[in-house]
Image (tube, grey):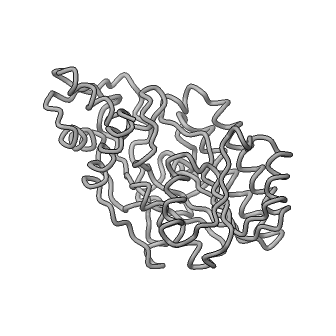
């Protein structure tokens, strides 16, 4: 990639998009297009088409999307499938129409079957039923992958798909009703400490295993793929190791400094029993993560504290 190339980062205010912007700028790529939701409605096909035809970026990072944890995915199922389908379809199609040859689509590890073998290889896609609690979101992301593959095959585009594991880090969503498990636990532990609570309650049994990747490592992987000139394919991005939700909660409690007991509400859903990605494809190309969970949680907690006082 040329340093003066024009980039469009869709979703630049979100956790993933803002991390990609930071990584591009750190790499000397400063010609970055960004539009807020008020400036450009990504669910509006005509508006997206006009924007990309006028600006003609050379590279697009498609990080925009409606995201959330188990509760949000399971409650707002219509919004999750509709908004994600519309955003990705509008951007990918308009990118093709505007002659944009290079695009990176950010998906999610929830695209894979609920009960597939672990660790999860890229070719396990569409080999079994999805996790019911986030099926609409997963179907939308699978559609995005197939859109990219189809434009590559029919029109010779170079649209690459990246599937990150569970992300965390700066600009995360800490809303207890709609956030993912890690930021929700971080906030709950912090507030429990401030109140002097005797215990911290966690949804589910604590037994499911999850892999967590700092968002800055995810962004580094995305720029790595673009810089290497990779023109197609599906790539898992993660650490290659996982922890139980109980272990995650215990680590968060230590980072936050909460000394109470940990209890689990087994009446709440667990989601997939395990979700560990096989990261061999990207590893063989020379990329690996740098930020371990303990380090990442410590910096993320400081980010959360700063956001609370801002």
Q: On the picture, is 250 further left or further right than 290?
A: left
The residue lying at 71 percent from left, 71 percent from top is 158
Q: Position of residue 233 (x, y in %)?
A: 62, 69
Q: On the picture, is 172 further left or further right than 47?
A: left
Q: Is residue 124 above or below residue 247?
A: below
| In front of the other: 76 or 298 | 298
Which residue extends farthest front? 310
Q: How many numbered dots are placed on residues in this image?
A: 0
Which residue extends farthest left? 259
Q: Is residue 39 above or below residue 30?
A: above
Quarter of the picture holding the C terminus: top left
The residue lying at 52 percent from left, 52 percent from top is 16
Q: Quadrant of residue 52?
A: bottom right
| In front of the other: 173 or 83 | 173
Q: Position of residue 134 (x, y in %)?
A: 55, 37
The residue lying at 66 percent from left, 64 percent from top is 7
Q: On the picture, is 270 further left or further right than 197?
A: right
Quarter of the picture holding the N terminus: bottom right
Q: Is residue 171 above or below residue 71?
A: below
Q: Position of residue 78 (x, y in %)?
A: 67, 30
The residue lying at 66 percent from left, 31 percent from top is 79
Q: Position of residue 248 (x, y in %)?
A: 27, 43
Q: Quadrant of residue 305?
A: top left
Q: On the picture, is 264 further left or further right than 76?
A: left
Q: Quadrant of residue 132?
A: top right
């Amino acid at each position: 990639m040329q340093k003066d190339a024009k980039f469009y980062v869709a979703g630049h205010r979100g956790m993933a998009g803002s991390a990609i912007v930071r990584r591009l700028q750190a790499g000397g790529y400063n010609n970055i297009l960004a539009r807020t939701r008020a400036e450009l409605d990504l669910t509006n096909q005509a508006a997206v088409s006009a924007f990309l035809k006028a600006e003609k970026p050379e590279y697009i990072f498609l990080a925009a999307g409606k995201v959330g944890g188990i509760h949000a995915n399971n409650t707002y199922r219509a919004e999750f499938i509709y908004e994600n389908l519309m955003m990705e379809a509008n951007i990918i199609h308009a990118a093709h129409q505007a002659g944009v040859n290079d695009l990176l689509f950010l998906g999610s590890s929830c695209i894979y079957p609920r009960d597939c073998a672990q660790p999860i290889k890229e070719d396990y896609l569409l080999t079994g039923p999805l996790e019911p609690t986030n099926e609409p979101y997963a179907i939308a992301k699978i559609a995005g992958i197939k859109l990219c593959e189809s434009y590559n095959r029919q029109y010779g585009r170079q649209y690459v798909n990246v599937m990150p594991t569970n992300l965390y880090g700066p600009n995360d969503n800490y809303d207890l009703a709609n956030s993912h498990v890690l930021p929700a636990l971080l906030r709950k532990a912090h507030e429990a400490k401030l109140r002097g609570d005797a215990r911290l309650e966690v949804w589910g049994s604590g037994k499911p295993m999850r892999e967590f990747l700092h968002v800055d490592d995810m962004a580094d992987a995305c720029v790595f793929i673009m810089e290497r000139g990779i023109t197609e394919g599906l790539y898992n991005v993660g650490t290659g190791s996982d922890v139980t939700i109980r272990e995650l909660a215990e680590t968060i409690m230590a980072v936050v400094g909460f000394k109470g007991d940990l209890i689990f509400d087994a009446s709440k859903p667990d989601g997939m029993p395990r979700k560990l990605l096989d990261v061999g494809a990207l590893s063989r190309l020379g990329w690996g993560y740098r930020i371990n969970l303990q380090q990442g949680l410590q910096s993320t907690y400081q980010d959360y504290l700063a956001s609370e006082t801002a």
